[in-house]
Image (cartoon, helix red, strand yellow):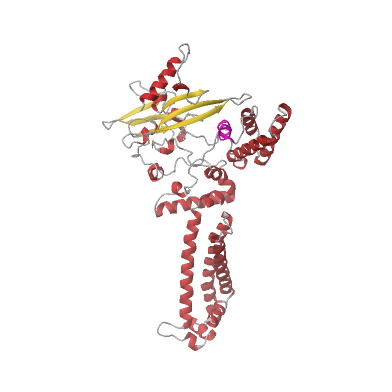
């Protein structure tokens, strides 16, 4: 059989096209197998090697398969012989003579064809699997998607594959996504893509197909205690506590009232960016809609406004790609101990350091270290070098997550609408400017969504402590305490 195989290769290689095809298919086949073995062994996990393995070599193999019959046709034309005559010339009669199940040459060709089919199917399956991995999405076009990928790896959804939210179900969605990916690849090659990459707010899959696979509206969520620690810009980095008992259930009231299937909200936003609302419609029990219009905004009749039904991502718009404000990122490091609060004025100096240099990442790292080292050497010479080194490392990590100069990603490039700390968030709709025809505005009471146990207070549960009679905040203190107790 080995001799028949070699003769078959010689036959297919009579023309240079066929010879090229044989070389391409054989070399790419064995190279693919070797790289697959190395991949399964964990020798490499690099996305660029994945591109070579799953895109380059199967493509070379396919091109080789095309060259082989083209070379055979050229051989027939040049020699003026039939296929049978060429085959019988290269093989013994016993090898080329037809039998019950075909000649030995035919059986060998049939076997090789089956191997080719299995190889192409296997390679295609592995290619699709590779292209659906987060590593491919985040690193194949490194500069383009690097900001989103770095933020994704540090997000609550880091174990969820990109395709579970960004690719719809079914063959149609798969084809559409691959065509979109081809367009993006062309833009990446020609350097015509947007910097920064715009958030795909208009074509994200609906929450029912993504979020609600894990977070279903029928589930009862009750309340959740959340503590936010801010720090003063003083020498002691004095902590101030905001403690909230979040009413996250969505049955009758609370933060997730919007996800109750019985409560439907539609809205139109200015320039369709979902930052400034033009009007909001709320479905009533009788099936009618009540419209609240923003009295500060006029509708542009020439603009094609998009009417959207509200779902999870209108508030949770950065669930897997979270970028933070400078103060929030530094305060988080202080809260988890990665920056020691015993370093004098470290809150203020750290924020100054990470916001003072944002147009070159490599120089930004050096700038942060030099600025902090210089400040403490000049103003606090007795500082702990170990604590400062730890602080610098943490601050540089925050800087590298949020600043990506090659993509023009800076602080607040991607605002987070969750809550109302960094943007208007909830107050985009819940404000006194959203008025219905009866002159009523959309409610914006603080206690609709959370009980407040402390608000930038020195104690984490400030409003649960007894209050003195002469305290000017006595009434508010007692109201918030009683509201918390009555909410259970």
* Farthest-out residue, bottom: 93
**Picture coordinates of residue 414, whole percent (x, y):** 53, 36
Residue 257: in magenta span? no
- At x 54%, y 74%, the residue is 71
Quadrant for the C terminus, please: top left
Q: Main structural element of the magenta stretch: helix, strand or loop?
A: helix
Q: Where is residue 202 in the image (x, y as percent from the top left)?
A: 44, 41
Residue 167 relative to residue 9: left or right: left
| In the image, residue 421 above or below residue 22 | above
Q: Say which residue appears at 46% left-offset and 68% top-offset.
A: 118
Write down the region rendered in magenta: 326-337
Establish if 191 lies above or below 293: below
Q: Where is residue 464 in the image (x, y as percent from the top left)?
A: 44, 22
Indicate yes or no whether the magenta region holds residue 329: yes
Residue 232: horizontal and vertical position, in percent? 58, 25
Residue 6, image quadrant: bottom right
Q: Residue furthest left?
A: 286
Q: Which of 334 and 274 is in front in this view?
A: 334
User: Would residue 443 be visible to someone looking at this image?
Assistant: no
Residue 265 visible to the viewer:
yes
Quarter where residue 390 is shown: top right
Q: Residue furthest front?
A: 466
């Amino acid at each position: 059989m080995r001799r028949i195989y070699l003769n078959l290769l010689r036959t297919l290689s009579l023309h240079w096209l066929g010879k090229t095809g044989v070389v391409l298919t054989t070399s790419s086949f064995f190279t693919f197998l070797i790289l697959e073995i190395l991949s399964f062994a964990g020798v490499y996990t690099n996305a660029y090697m994945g591109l070579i393995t799953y895109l380059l070599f199967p493509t070379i193999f396919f091109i080789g398969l095309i060259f082989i019959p083209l070379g055979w046709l050229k051989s027939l034309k040049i020699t003026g012989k039939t296929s049978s005559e060429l085959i019988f010339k290269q093989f013994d009669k016993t090898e080329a003579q037809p039998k019950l199940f075909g000649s030995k040459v035919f059986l060998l060709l049939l076997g090789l064809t089956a191997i080719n089919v299995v190889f192409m199917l296997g390679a295609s399956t592995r290619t699709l699997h590779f292209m659906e991995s987060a590593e491919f999405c985040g690193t194949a076009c490194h500069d383009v998607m690097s900001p989103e990928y770095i933020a994704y790896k540090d997000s609550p959804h880091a174990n969820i594959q990109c395709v579970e939210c960004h690719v719809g179900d079914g063959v149609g969605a798969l084809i559409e996504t691959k065509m979109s990916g081809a367009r993006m690849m062309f833009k990446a090659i020609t350097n015509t893509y947007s910097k920064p990459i715009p958030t795909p707010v208009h074509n994200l899959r609906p929450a029912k197909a993504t979020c609600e696979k894990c977070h279903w509206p029928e589930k009862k969520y009750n309340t959740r205690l959340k503590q936010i620690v801010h720090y003063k810009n003083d020498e002691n980095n004095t902590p101030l506590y905001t403690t909230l008992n979040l009413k996250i259930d969505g049955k009758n009231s609370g933060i997730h009232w919007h996800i109750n299937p019985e409560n439907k909200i539609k809205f139109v936003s200015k320039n369709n960016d979902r930052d400034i609302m033009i009007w909001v419609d709320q479905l009533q029990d009788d099936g009618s809609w009540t419209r609240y219009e923003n009295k500060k905004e006029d509708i542009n009749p020439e603009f094609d406004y998009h009417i959207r039904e509200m779902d999870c991502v209108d508030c949770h718009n950065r669930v897997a790609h979270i970028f933070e404000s400078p103060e929030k990122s530094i305060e988080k490091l202080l809260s988890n101990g990665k920056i020691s609060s015993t370093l004098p004025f470290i809150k203020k100096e750290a924020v100054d350091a990470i916001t003072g240099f944002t147009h070159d990442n490599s120089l930004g790292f050096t700038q942060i270290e030099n600025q902090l080292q210089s400040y403490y050497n000049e103003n606090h010479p007795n500082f702990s070098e170990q604590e400062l080194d730890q602080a610098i490392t943490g601050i540089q990590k925050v800087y590298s997550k949020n600043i990506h100069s090659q993509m023009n990603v800076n602080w607040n490039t991607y605002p987070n609408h969750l809550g109302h700390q960094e943007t208007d968030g909830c107050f985009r709709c819940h404000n006194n400017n959203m008025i219905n025809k009866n002159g009523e505005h959309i409610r914006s009471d603080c206690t609709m969504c959370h009980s407040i146990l402390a608000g930038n207070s020195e104690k984490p549960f400030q409003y649960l402590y007894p209050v003195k009679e002469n305290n000017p905040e006595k009434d508010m203190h007692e109201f918030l305490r009683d509201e918390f107790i009555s909410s259970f």
